Image (cartoon, helix red, strand yellow):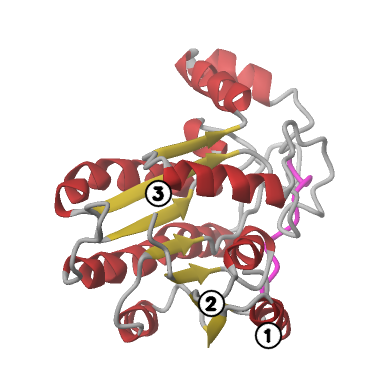
Amino acid sequence: MKHDRILITGASSGLGQALSLTLARPGRTLWLGGRNPERLNKTARDCISRGAAVHLNLCDVTDRHAMADWVQGTRGLDMVLACAGITGGTRKPQGADTPATESPAQIRRIFETDLYGVLNTVLPALELMQGQPRATDGLRGRICAISSVAGLVSFPGTPSYSAAKAAVDRFMVATGGNTKKAGILLSSVVCGFLDTPMVARNTFPMPGLTDVNSACRRILRGLARNERRITFPLWLAAGSRLMDLLPIKLAEAYYNNQPAGAPGSMPEPEPDLG
């Protein structure tokens, strides 16, 4: 698998940071993007100490034009990992006759980051790779976006997050059916809870919580195998798919009596993560 030139978003924290460090080695060039300058610089120093060449971009994935300029400015990439993302759940009802809701600002921010942020990364990368020659394995490049097991279900605890991640997964898998003919592999990572700062303040048990190093190994193994959908933990994804087959009334009766994702159990997204 050719991956000497790699672009990673969300590299200042969590999975994006872990993938950056895992992939850093002599002879490899990393383009790393994130919103927190101190953490991004720390990631860069650690990657350089492992022998990689590093180019930093303090960026917000919601800025469509800035992202296009950054991706196109690399002049060639073997792999793109779209890891930037945020999460958030519903707030506790404010009265006896009011629902558990997300604020309109949070809803828009999650869609702008988790869905449009992925598109702002993937679309210019597709355009760039289309102009590249095929490598010896027949591919022009690989693009991987992080979805979630939450995208497999209509989960009342995280409505916007579930919807955005569902859209990411469907877009990457469906579009990948076309781009593979042109030598560009699109992969979606459908993962459960990862032990990152993004979930550190959740106040409920997180089934299947996976450390980021194990997640990195699974993702890179899946990419090496040209997997279009990289899923883990399998038991959690399988259970989620089964839940989504149930009548809505039954599924909601179960979800609304679980501690996971209960109203008020997840903080609003922090502004500097990613």
* Range shown magenta: 263-271
- Residue type marked 1: Asn
x and y percentages locating residue 7 in the rendered image = 45, 71
The label number, if any, that marks residue 41 in the structure image: 1
Q: Secondary structure at mark 2?
A: strand
3 vs 2, front mark: 2
Measured as percent of width and height from the top left, residue 135 is found at 25, 61
C-alpha gap between disc 3 and disc 2: 21 Å
Is the magenta region chiefly helix, strand or loop?
Answer: loop
In the drawing, does residue 105 fall left or right of residue 272?
left
Which residue, given by chain and number where applicable, does mark 3 sit on?
Answer: 168
Element marked by disc 3: helix
Task: Give the number of the disc on residue 32.
Answer: 2
**Amino acid type at image mark 3:** Val
Residue count near mark 2 (Cα–Cα under 10 Å), binned few <14, some 14–19, many ≥20: many
Label 3 or label 2, whichever comes before in sequence order? 2
Above or below 240: residue 82: below
Q: In this rendering, does residue 163 appear at all? A: no
Residues at discs 3 and 2 in contact (Cβ within 8 Å): no
- Upstream in sequence: badge 3 or badge 1: 1
Q: Examine the rendered structure and indicate whether residue 150 appears above or below residue 110.
A: above
Look at discs 3 and 1 and give the one toward the viewer: 1
Residue at image coords 30%, 76%: 76
Which of the pair 77/153 is nearer the observer?
A: 77
Name the image quarter holding the C terminus.
bottom right
10 Å crowding of disc 1: few (<14), some (14-19), many (20+): some
In the rendered image, residue 56, in percent from the top left (x then y), is placed at 54, 85
Compared with residue 241, is residue 176 higher up or lower down, i.e. above or below? below
